[in-house]
Image: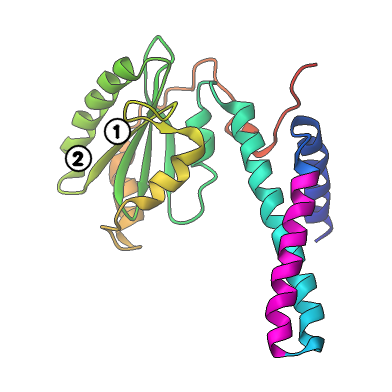
């Protein structure tokens, strides 16, 4: 518990540096939660309204805190090689993420994700058209081993021209239909492992950087 509180304190200090609006919005989230909790509690009784108001206030403030923290994290890594991998590795649930299964000289990257939806190839780079070529090549390579398992593709970009913004990547991943059982997912991941050539993210970032927003230079 003590370690968790220290992490929150550190994240709060970093968030204040990169997002001046965060404190006010977090207070606003707490006030909204307070009003909602009090209103629901009064329907039951006055004694219930007080603890419910406090509980909802805390939940509202934390929800806003997490939202602003995530936005700051995305802003800190957006545009860097490997940013998509950093976001993918933070997803909750049964996901196996293998960064940079395909790389070219332009630092375009394709990451492989295995989950209940099957296989998802996530590409990122400075040129969506060039990235699509790298993505198609990797999809063909994986298709020889995947069999009848669905292979989805996602291109990370500015949200235009069929690309997905970094801030919507996790949401997009969770939208895919579930095709595999929980026991089939790790079996599929093991089947794909021999394909890995293990290229490092060239000139990239530490995937853990997504966990901590960095202050902008002044």
Q: Which residue is mark 1?
A: 195
133 shown above or below 206: above
Say if residue 177 shows up in the picture. yes
**Marker disc for residue 64:** none
Q: Which residues are magenta?
A: 24-44
Report the residue that reaches farthest toward the top.
105
Quarter holding residue 196: top left
Q: Residue at x 24, y 42 (%)?
A: 151
In screen coordinates, is 59 left or right of 111? right
Asked whether the residues under the numbered discs 2 and 1 touch, taking CB atoms below 8 Å apart as contact, a structural biologist would say yes
- The picture places residue 2, in percent across and down from the top left corner, at 84, 58
| Magenta-span inclusion, residue 30 | yes
Say if residue 208 shows up in the picture. no
Q: Earlier in the sequence, mark 2 or mark 1?
A: 2
Q: How is the image coloured?
A: rainbow
In screen coordinates, is 119 left or right of 10? left
Q: Residue at x 51, y 53 (%)?
A: 92
Quarter holding residue 69: top right
> Secondary structure beneath disc 2?
helix
Q: Which residue is mark 2?
A: 145
Image quarter (top left, top right, bottom left or bottom right) of the C terminus: top right
191 shown above or below 110: below
Q: How many marks?
A: 2
- CA separation, marks 2 and 1? 9 Å
- The picture places residue 10, in percent across and down from the top left corner, at 81, 42
Give the main secondary structure, helix, strand or loop, of the magenta stretch. helix
Q: Residue at x 25, y 57 (%)?
A: 179
Q: Residue at x 71, y 76 (%)?
A: 39
Bin the neighbour count of mark 1 within 10 Å (Cα to Cα): few under 14, some 14-19, many 20 and up.
Answer: few
Nearer to me, 70 or 116: 70
């Amino acid at each position: 518990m003590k370690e968790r509180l220290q992490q929150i304190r550190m994240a709060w200090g970093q968030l204040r540096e990169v997002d001046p609006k965060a404190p006010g919005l977090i207070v606003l989230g707490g006030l909204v939660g307070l009003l909602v909790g009090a209103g629901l509690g009064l329907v039951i009784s006055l004694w219930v309204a007080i603890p419910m108001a406090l509980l909802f206030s805390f939940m509202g403030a934390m929800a806003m805190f997490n939202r602003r923290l995530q936005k700051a994290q995305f802003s800190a890594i957006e545009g860097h090689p490997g940013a998509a991998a950093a976001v993918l590795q933070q997803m909750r649930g049964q996901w196996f993420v293998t960064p940079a299964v395909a790389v070219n000289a332009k630092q375009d990257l394709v990451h492989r994700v295995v989950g209940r939806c099957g296989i998802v190839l996530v590409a990122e780079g400075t040129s969506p058209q060039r990235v699509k070529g790298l993505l198609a090549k990797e999809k063909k390579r994986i298709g020889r081993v995947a069999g009848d398992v669905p292979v989805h593709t996602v291109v990370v970009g500015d949200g235009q021209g069929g690309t997905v913004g970094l801030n919507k990547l996790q949401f997009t991943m969770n939208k895919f239909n579930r095709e595999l059982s929980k026991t089939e997912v790790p079996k599929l991941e093991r089947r794909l492992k021999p394909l890995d050539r293990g290229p490092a993210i060239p000139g990239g970032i530490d995937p853990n950087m997504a966990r901590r927003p960095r202050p902008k230079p002044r």
